[in-house]
Image (cartoon, rainbow, N blue to C red):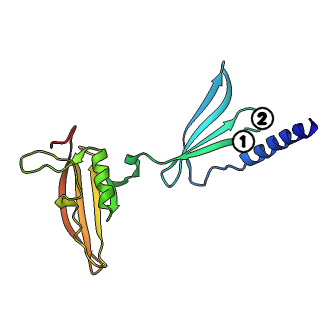
């Protein structure tokens, strides 16, 4: 019985030391702090931090005792938080989603947000890798770059495609992208 009691206390002590080794990374910004209560008595604090990578860190603190971090978890940022804000002084600016040369990821993103290109009849079909606007132009050592831009003034979208020729960027095309409730067949 003494051995079991000793192992239990030893395990709890090790777990307590292990739990205290969590720390908040430098550059993390506190977003929200919530106190959980049971019959009006606080028992745990949850704090959300935004990391420099854009991920959200959840840290849970034990209110009783040492108030040390007991556990933490990290979530990936929401899709819209992945874009970079382009600020234009005195104007709303843009949010830019740079997909590099990964047109597959771009097509999936457009499907998630129900974005597409209007055809000559005014219909919008589901984006596909076979569409002309997703065709890579670069060859050999050259690179393509696909950027989806959201205008923060009126929430319109544009697809910018550019590529390199012998290391110099060349503008290929801009395409108007629209948001729809459903795609036409």
**Foreground: 88 or 126?**
126
Badge 1 crowding class, 10 Å Cα cut-off, few under 14, some 14 to 19, many 20 or more, is some
Can you say whether 103 is above or below 108 in the image? Answer: below
Q: Which residue is mark 2?
A: 65
Is there a contact, CB below 8 Å, between mark 1 and mark 2? yes
* Residue shown at the point (19%, 67%) measured from the top left: 172
| Residue 137 x, y percent position in the rendering | 22, 70
- Find residue 36 and report its image quarter: top right
Residue lying farthest to the right in this orientation: 2
Callout count: 2
Question: Does 37 sit left or right of 159 as displayed?
Answer: right
Query: Relative to residue 132, is residue 46 depicted above or below?
Result: above
| Residue 94 visible in the snapshot | no
Q: Determine whether, in the image, residue 79 is placed left or right of residue 127.
A: right
Q: Is 49 or 127 nearer to us in this picture? A: 127
Q: Secondary structure at mark 1?
A: loop
Report which residue position mark 1 lands on: 68
* Quadrant where the C terminus is found in the figure: top left
Residue 133, how many percent across, how many down?
A: 19, 60
Which residue occupies the extreme top position in the image?
39
């Amino acid at each position: 019985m003494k051995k079991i009691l000793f192992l239990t206390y030893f395990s709890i002590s090790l777990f307590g030391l292990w739990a205290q080794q969590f720390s908040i990374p430098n550059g993390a910004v506190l977003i929200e702090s919530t106190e959980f209560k049971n019959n009006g008595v606080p028992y745990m604090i949850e704090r959300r931090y935004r990391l420099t990578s854009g991920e959200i860190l959840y840290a849970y603190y034990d209110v009783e005792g040492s108030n040390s971090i007991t556990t933490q978890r990290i979530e990936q940022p929401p899709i819209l938080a992945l874009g970079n804000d382009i600020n234009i002084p005195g104007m709303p600016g843009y949010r830019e989603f740079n997909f590099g040369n990964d047109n597959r990821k771009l097509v999936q993103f457009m499907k998630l947000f129900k974005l597409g290109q209007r055809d000559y009849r005014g219909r919008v079909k589901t984006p596909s890798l076979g569409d002309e606007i997703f065709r890579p132009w670069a060859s050999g050592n050259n690179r393509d770059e696909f950027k989806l831009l959201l205008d923060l003034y009126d929430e319109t979208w544009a697809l910018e495609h550019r590529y390199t020729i012998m290391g110099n960027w060349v503008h290929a095309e801009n395409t108007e992208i629209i948001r729809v409730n459903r795609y036409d067949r």
